């Protein structure tokens, strides 16, 4: 979901109390657009997506007006009235979410080359394809031809000045195998033991992690996914008596309590904490993003305009109200020049490893309130998680599931031509996971992506996307 630019953070104490100042407003009339929070917009979209069927063309959150904008294909006045009565703003578009999902799957089959990404841009009702500076010659021709074959107005290509690759170094810093990453969120595992989530490319770089370089290990990796269908790892504390509070250290002795996990929504204001660059904020610009890192393809990621640098990999992406949203995966640029950054959805990671946020009381909130369920709608900070078919993350081109990956190492191998799991699964009438979901990718989605992979060797070169 797309919205106004986020205010820069001068200090956590300034931003955190104000990030969600806009709350649900009263509805002035049966057809007047409602003012609502991003979470409420996600909840509303859950209901609308199921009702609109093939007329649904995606949606996004207008943060400036605090309104939900729903793309509608065709000129059916009854559909427009239905959207208006629900309190949203209908907008006539050319492409349905199903059509854009099919386009994304075609790109996965025909144009999966390192240095590319694609995500749904509901503001332009197209698939946004991004190519970094390494895509040239035959690879560029292949990409350009695949986009042209989709037909006019379905997709567009945007150049990234950077280079898509992974970077890992630094909440709190953790060290392992010569790499530096960031601790994401403390969790409770299935057997009740304390642990934490971090980036998968960190988890495949080292089995044990410590609080200091060359220090005594404090945790052992139990599961790690990278590349492929995500970028996440579960690390359990070696001492089962370890106190693992459910909070994010935001620096200067301040913390933010993390009470639940929920899916992201395009247009949502978010905050990132990393051990290298500290606290930074921005907005979600795309969901279900596919990123073709040099190490391989990663799918199902959140795309934002929040900056990050080497060492921030695995760090926490959260909202001002204490909702866990993502784990830093990769990106391009730095916190001086800016850039695009990608995150692993926390809800997906929790489900995959069978863990819960904190003591587990808030971990299921996303699903219970419309969160991670397959048919649910737009993901929201508190209430509505992004459903596989619905909502906020709906990028028809989100593409995250499209491209399988190669093994994760610093130099990485090329992504497979056909990509990996779930390539064709999301092309159904309702789209696959997060495919038709609407509140998806913003107009800026996809630029200069990068992995946040392992390795202290990652540089802070503003031109390249590295693993954090």
Image (cartoon, rainbow, N blue to C red):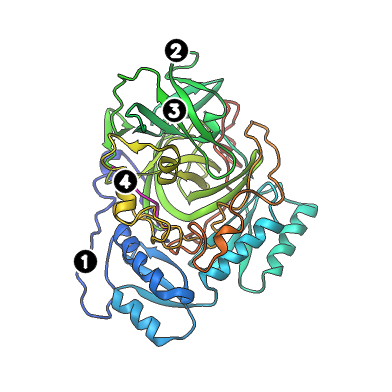
Give the mark toward the camera: 4 or 3. 4
Q: Quadrant of the N terminus?
A: bottom left
**Label 2 Cα crowd, 10 Å radius (few <14 / some 14-19 / many 20+):** few
User: Does residue 196 show up?
Assistant: yes
Q: CA distance from mark 2 to mark 3?
A: 15 Å
Drawn side of residue 249 relative to residue 146, left or right: left
Q: Which mark is residue 216?
A: 2
Residue tagged 4: 364
- 339 or 293: nearer the viewer: 293
Instruction: Tell me which numbered mark, 2 or 1, is placed earlier along the sequence.
Output: 1
Q: CA distance from mark 2 to mark 1?
A: 52 Å
Picture quadrant where residue 206 is located? top right
Q: Magenta residues?
A: 260-266
Instruction: Tell me which numbered mark, 2 or 4, is placed earlier along the sequence.
Output: 2
Q: Which mark is residue 25?
A: 1
Identify which residue is drawn at 68% across, 46% down. Answer: 114
Instruction: Tell me which numbered mark, 4 or 3, is placed earlier along the sequence.
Output: 3
Residue 412 coordinates in the image, percent (x, y): 67, 35
**Label 3 Cα crowd, 10 Å radius (few <14 / some 14-19 / many 20+):** many
- In reply to whether residue 10 is colored magenta, the answer given is no
Residue 49 coordinates in the image, percent (x, y): 40, 69
Residue 109 coordinates in the image, percent (x, y): 69, 57
User: Does residue 335 show up?
Assistant: no
Q: CA distance from mark 1 to mark 4?
A: 27 Å
Q: Of helix, strand and loop, which one carries label 4?
A: loop
Drawn side of residue 345 relative to residue 43, left or right: right
Q: Which mark is residue 235?
A: 3
């Amino acid at each position: 979901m797309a919205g106004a630019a986020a205010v820069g953070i001068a200090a956590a104490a300034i931003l955190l109390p104000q990030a969600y100042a806009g709350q649900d407003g009263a509805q002035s009339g049966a057809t007047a657009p409602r003012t609502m929070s991003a979470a409420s917009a996600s909840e509303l979209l859950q209901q609308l997506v199921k009702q609109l069927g093939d007329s649904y063309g995606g949606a996004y959150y207008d943060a400036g007006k605090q309104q939900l904008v729903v793309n509608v294909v065709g000129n059916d006045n009854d559909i427009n009235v239905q959207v208006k009565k629900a309190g949203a703003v209908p907008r006539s578009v050319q492409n349905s979410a199903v059509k854009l999902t099919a386009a994304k799957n075609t790109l996965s089959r025909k144009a999966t080359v390192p240095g590319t990404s694609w995500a749904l841009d509901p503001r332009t009702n197209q698939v946004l394809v991004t190519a970094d500076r390494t895509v040239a010659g035959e690879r560029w021709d292949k990409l350009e031809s695949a986009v042209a074959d989709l037909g006019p107005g379905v997709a567009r290509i945007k150049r990234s000045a950077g280079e898509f690759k992974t970077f890992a170094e630094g909440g709190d810093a953790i060290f392992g195998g010569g790499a530096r990453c960031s601790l994401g969120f403390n969790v409770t595992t299935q057997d009740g033991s304390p642990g934490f989530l971090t980036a998968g490319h960190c988890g495949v770089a080292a089995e044990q992690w410590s609080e200091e370089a060359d220090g005594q290990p404090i945790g052992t990796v139990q599961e790690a996914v990278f590349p492929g269908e995500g970028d996440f790892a579960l690390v359990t504390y070696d001492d089962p008596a370890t106190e693992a509070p459910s909070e994010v250290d935001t620096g200067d002795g301040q913390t933010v309590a993390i009470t639940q996990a929920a899916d992201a929504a395009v247009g949502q204001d978010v905050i990132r904490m990393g051990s290298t660059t500290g606290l930074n904020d921005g907005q979600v610009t795309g969901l279900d993003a596919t990123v073709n890192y040099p190490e391989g393809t990663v799918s199902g990621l959140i795309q934002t305009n929040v900056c990050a640098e080497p060492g921030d990999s695995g760090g926490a992406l959260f909202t001002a109200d204490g909702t866990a949203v993502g784990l830093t995966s990769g990106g391009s640029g730095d916190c001086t020049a800016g850039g695009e950054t990608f995150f692993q959805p926390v809800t997906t990671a929790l489900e995959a490893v069978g863990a819960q946020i904190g003591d587990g009381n808030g971990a299921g909130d996303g699903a219970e309130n419309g969160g991670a369920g397959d048919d649910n709608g737009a993901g929201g900070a508190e209430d509505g998680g992004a459903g596989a078919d619905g909502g906020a993350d709906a990028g028809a081109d989100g593409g995250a599931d499209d491209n399988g990956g190669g093994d994760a190492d610093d130099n990485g191998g090329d992504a497979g031509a056909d990509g990996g799991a779930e390539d064709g699964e999301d092309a159904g009438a309702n789209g696959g996971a997060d495919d038709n979901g609407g509140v998806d990718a913003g107009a800026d989605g996809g630029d200069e992506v990068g992995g946040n992979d392992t390795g202290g060797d990652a540089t802070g070169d503003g031109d390249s996307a590295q693993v954090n």
